Image (spheres, rainbow, N blue to C red):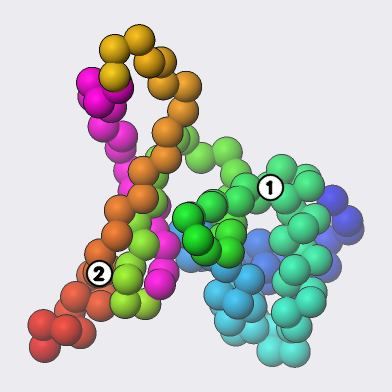
Amino acid sequence: MERKTRQREAICAAFQRADRPLGPHEVLAEAQQVIGGLGLATVYRAVRDLLEAGWLQPVELPGEPPRYEVAGKHHHHHFRCLQCAKVYELEGCPSTLDRLLPPGFRMTDHQIVLYGQCASCTSLTSS
């Protein structure tokens, strides 16, 4: 990873503050609260470097551009709000997934994404 800069520190802090997967535009909005003149190209370069360094890992959702989260977390799944499009981490994992497999099949990995409304969006629609 390249040397530490104020921009890179603001980008890393944005991921840590959010504590959820972020897309480049979300990172930019968060980091601009610290460094107003930060640009999207700087965010993309930093994300690329942080991926190469193993500090970030991609979060791939079907049909969407990747988001990124801090690497090294325990196994988890994700929730995507259909209203605001934010993605959140879900704790826990169902231990009975192997029961869904046809006879003779062996599961080697899995990803679960739940979809719906986050708490913020639910409170807006119920007001």
Q: Could you tell me residue 79's position as x and y percent?
A: 34, 56
Looking at the image, is mark 1 or mark 2 earlier in the sequence? 1
Range of the magenta residues? 85-101
**Label 1 crowd (10 A; few <14 / some 14-19 / many >=20):** some
Q: Classify residue 34 by image quadrant.
A: bottom right
Residue at coordinates 16% horizontally, 84% vertically from top-left?
125
Q: Which residue is mark 2?
A: 117
Q: Which mark is residue 55?
A: 1
Task: Kindly tell me whether residue 15 is visible in this rendering.
Answer: no
Which amino acid type corresponds to the residue marked 1 in the rendered image?
Trp
Residue at coordinates 60% horizontally, 44% vertically from top-left?
71
Task: Kindly tell me whether residue 40 is visible in this rendering.
Answer: yes
Q: Is residue 3 left or right of residue 21?
A: right
Q: Is residue 34 left or right of residue 107?
A: right
Q: Which mark is residue 118?
A: none
Name the element at disc 1: loop
Q: Is residue 67 left or right of residue 52?
A: left
Q: Could you tell me residue 42's position as x and y percent?
A: 79, 74
